[in-house]
Amino acid sequence: MDTKSLEDAIRNSGHIVCLLGRHVAADCGCLDYRLVDTAYAIETKYGYSPEEIFSASFYNTRMKTFFDFYHNEILSKLGEPDACIHALKKMEDDGKLFSVVTRSVYGIPGRAGMRHVLELHGSVYQNRCPHCHTEYDVEFMKNADGIPLCTKCGQPVRPQITLAGEMIRNQLVTDAANEISQADTLLVLGCTMDSMLAQGCIKYFDGNRIILINEEENYSDNIADMIYHVKPRDILPNVYR
C-alpha cells in the first residue's frame, strides 16, 4: 500500500474537510444498527426494525418503546475516540483540517476535543425539553427510568437528533456546503462514495482531490482520486503523527 502518496497529499493540502462516515463511529465502539446481524437482533428484541424505531412517527406514537431502545442500545454503546479520531484532532490542531462533517449522533470528534464539527443529525449529548427548553446532559438521559421527564415541567425530554422523517436544519446544510466549497482536499472516511453523507456533500466540492479511506469496496469508489480499502484507524494515524 502506497502510504507515502497519502502522507504527501495530506501534508501538501492547505484546507482539508473530512466527511466522517458511520464505520468510523462503529470502530470507536458505537452502535451501528444498520449491520444485518445487529438489525435482526434489535427487531427480534423489540418487535420493530431499528429504522422503524429511529423515526419521528415512532417517537410520537410509541415513545416508551423508543426510549427503551434508545436507553438500552444507543446510550449503552457510545464508544470512545480511537486513533483515527485523534489523528484528525492533530490535523485540526496543525491547521490542516478545517472542519468535520458527519451524520453520526455519537459526538465522537467533539469528545476528542475537536472544535469544528458539523453534526448534521445532531448529537445524543444535546437534550432539551420542547416545552420549557431546559437543557439536559447525556447522563440525565442515561439515568432516566423509562421516558425521561423534565424536572421543571414534567414533559418528555427530547434528544436533539434528527430522526427519520425529519428535515436536517437548513443552517447546518448551508454551513456544511460553505465549508466543503472552500476545501482543496475532501477526506472521506468510513463510508462509500454512494453513502447518503458523501452523496449529499460532494456536490459542493470543487477542490483538487478526494481521498477515500474505507474498508468496504464499492462501485462508486472511482469518484475518488485516491482510494485506500482499509479501516481509517489502521492507516491515518501512521501517515499523520
Image (cartoon, rainbow, N blue to C red):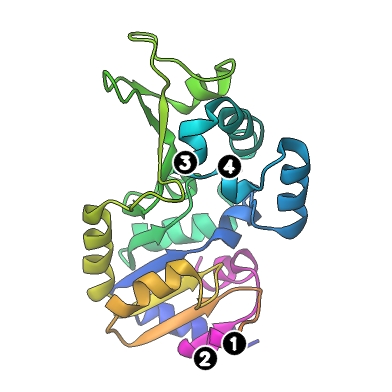
* Amino acid on which disc 1 is placed: Tyr
Give me the C-alpha separation between circle 2 and circle 3.
Answer: 37 Å
Observer-side mark, 2 or 1, equals 1
Residue 232: give x, y in percent of width and height.
Answer: 59, 68
The answer to the question of whether label 2 and label 3 lie on touching residues, with beta carbons closer than 8 A, is: no
Mark sitting earlier along the chain (3/1): 3
Dot label at residue 222: 2
From this viewpoint, is residue 156 visible? yes
Mark sitting earlier along the chain (1/4): 4
Mark 1 Cα within 10 Å, few/some/many (few <14, many 20+)? few
Q: Quadrant of the N terminus?
A: bottom right
Q: Is residue 165 left or right of residue 194?
A: left
The stretch in magenta equals: 220-241
Mark 2 Cα within 10 Å, few/some/many (few <14, many 20+)? few
Mark sitting earlier along the chain (2/3): 3
Q: Report the residue at 45% width, 42% height from top.
A: 56
Q: Is residue 38 left or right of residue 141?
A: right
Classify mark 3: helix, strand or loop. Answer: helix
Dot label at residue 57: 3
Classify mark 2: helix, strand or loop. Answer: helix
Residue 178: give x, y in percent of width and height.
Answer: 21, 67
Q: Report the residue at 33% width, 53% height from top.
A: 168
- Among the 4 quarters of the image, the one containing residue 133: top left
The answer to the question of whether label 2 and label 1 lie on touching residues, with beta carbons closer than 8 A, is: yes
Observer-side mark, 3 or 1, equals 3
Q: Is residue 226 magenta?
A: yes
Residue 142: give x, y in percent of width and height.
Answer: 56, 24
* Amino acid on which disc 4 is placed: Ile
Q: Which residue is mark 1?
A: 219
Q: Is residue 108 magenta?
A: no
Dot label at residue 53: 4
